[in-house]
Amino acid sequence: MSIIYKPCGMAREYSPYALNIYIGCSHRCKYCYAPHTLQKKSEYYFGKPEPRKNLLKLLEKDLKNNKYTEQVLLSFVGDCYCDSADNGQTVREVLKMLNYYKVPVAVLSKVGKKMLRDLDIFKEFGDRITVGTTLTFLDEKKSKEWEPFASLPSERLETLKTLHDNGIKTFASFEPTIEPVESLKLIKKTLEQDSVDHYKIGKLNNYMGYDKWQDWEQYAKDCIALLRPTNKQVYYKQCLRVLAPNVEFLECECDPDRYIVKVNEENGNIQISLFDK
């Protein structure tokens, strides 16, 4: 059984493959779905997680037996750069192994500068990697309320800029969008500093009815007004599109696989295809 797996449902809109390094997280985000999904009590999920047992051996076996030409996301369960028991060493070894086997990779985290300790490995991937962060609030007080132990928004924005300036393809995840006004402010910030290549935009889902009173159609219109003139690569998640029936989305804005990192093999030659040029 492969340790790299095919996600389903809403997760599939993010990546065709995924790898979870830890089964736990230190961020304690209010909206986190993982404890419920894994049927774990919060006190057993949140904390300093250990790497999954025999992860590196299982991963090497998987990579020897299977070829992955479409991106593997790190990760859906837990932030791979959270405050872990191994101080992130397993993440670094996983990245080295994925790079050795020429696997295309997407990294998603909320930690900010801590990701930069692996900047040297990100660079070794070349066009086979994209690195992103989740952006929820520009207001630091609200950010701490909802994501108590994740990095502050200013640090996440700064890290995106550093990655982009170092030639790393970047993406920003606006899922969950909790308060559209805050997300729109963040989109404007990323455009001002020109730090994001690709945007993934969704909404808060099924958290104590908090999403029921938001005007999601207007949010979609406002995002389009900001982003479409820039020709940035944008994907609007289905959960948002279905609540914006009067919005005309472009075909490229509705295809979850259009901008993934992938490797195409033709006539024995490897061709890298990362986003539309």
Image (cartoon, helix red, strand yellow):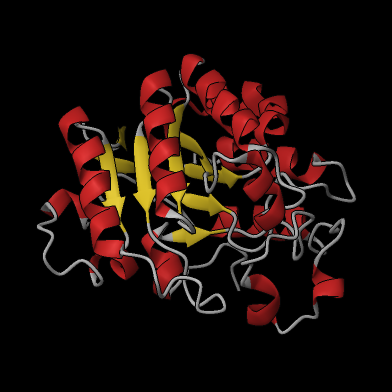
Q: Is residue 258 visible?
A: yes
- Image x and y of residue 263, in percent: 35, 41
- Name the residue rendered at 24%, 57% in the picture: 218
- Name the residue rendered at 41%, 48% in the picture: 181
In front here: 68 or 172? Answer: 172
- Image x and y of residue 54, in percent: 81, 61
In front here: 128 or 22? Answer: 22
- Name the residue rendered at 60%, 58% in the picture: 19
Horizontally, residue 2 falls left or right of residue 69, namely right
Kindly indicate the quadrant of the structure image that contains residue 91. top right
Q: Is residue 196 visible?
A: no
Residue most extreme to the right: 85
The answer to whether residue 251 is above or below residue 116 is below
- Image x and y of residue 217, in percent: 24, 62
Horizontally, residue 200 falls left or right of residue 85, namely left
- Image x and y of residue 82, in percent: 75, 48
Kindly indicate the quadrant of the structure image that contains residue 92. top right
